[in-house]
């Protein structure tokens, strides 16, 4: 399984920019992956994250090979809407999709312990 890194910076605190960038990284795997979700993120000033992410999750579930997405420097993300959306994403990831988050501090998310098991997301 090849990791697909997304190097984050302070400018990625805009939710639409964050997810367009994330989907762009996934499109290096398959060019059409997340295209419908990307359209929703770019078409509106206030996209519905749940609807957009559901479209993305459906695309991820259709992949035949496992995917590892790496969000690097996540500590630079301070926007609560992004943390909530990533929590939604983590809660609904298909089993063939793995999310790795690198950060210097614990993010304000319930999955911050970094557990590899979907049913074990709380710190021990």
Image (cartoon, helix red, strand yellow):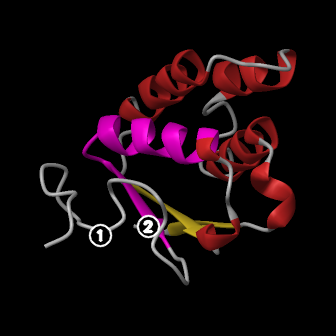
Number of marks: 2
In the image, which is nearer the foreground, mark 1 or mark 2? 1
Residue depicted at x 23% and y 65%: 116
Q: Farthest residue to the bottom: give it.
A: 104
Which label's residue is closer to the chain start, 1 or 2? Answer: 2
Residue depicted at x 45% and y 73%: 106
In front of the other: 16 or 22: 16
Picture layout, residue 118 above or below residue 34: below
Q: Is residue 75 left or right of residue 11?
A: left
The residue that disc 2 covers is: 100
Picture layout, residue 5 above or below residue 94: below
Q: Measured from the top left, where is residue 72 in percent x and y? A: 61, 73
* SS for dot 1: loop
Image quarter (top left, top right, bottom left or bottom right) of the N terminus: bottom left
Which range is magenta? 81-101
The residue that disc 1 covers is: 113
Q: Measured from the top left, where is residue 82 in percent x and y? A: 61, 44
Q: Residues within 10 Å of mark 2 (few under 14, many from 20)?
A: some
Give residue 74's quadrant in the image: bottom right
Q: Measured from the top left, where is residue 66 in percent x and y? A: 35, 53
Q: Measured from the top left, where is residue 87 in percent x and y? A: 42, 44
Picture layout, residue 13 above or below residue 54: below
Residue depicted at x 85% and y 16%: 43
* SS for dot 2: strand
């Amino acid at each position: 399984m090849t990791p697909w890194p997304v190097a984050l910076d302070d400018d990625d605190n805009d939710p639409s920019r964050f997810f367009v960038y994330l989907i762009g990284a996934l499109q290096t795997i398959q060019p059409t992956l997340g295209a419908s979700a990307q359209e929703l993120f770019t078409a509106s000033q206030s996209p519905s994250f749940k609807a957009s992410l559901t479209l993305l999750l459906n695309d991820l579930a259709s992949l035949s090979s496992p995917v590892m997405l790496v969000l690097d420097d996540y500590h630079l993300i301070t926007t609560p809407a992004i943390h909530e959306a990533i929590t939604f994403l983590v809660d609904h990831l298909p089993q063939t999709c793995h999310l790795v988050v690198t950060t210097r501090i614990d993010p304000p998310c319930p999955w911050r312990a970094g557990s590899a098991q979907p049913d074990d997301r709380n710190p021990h």
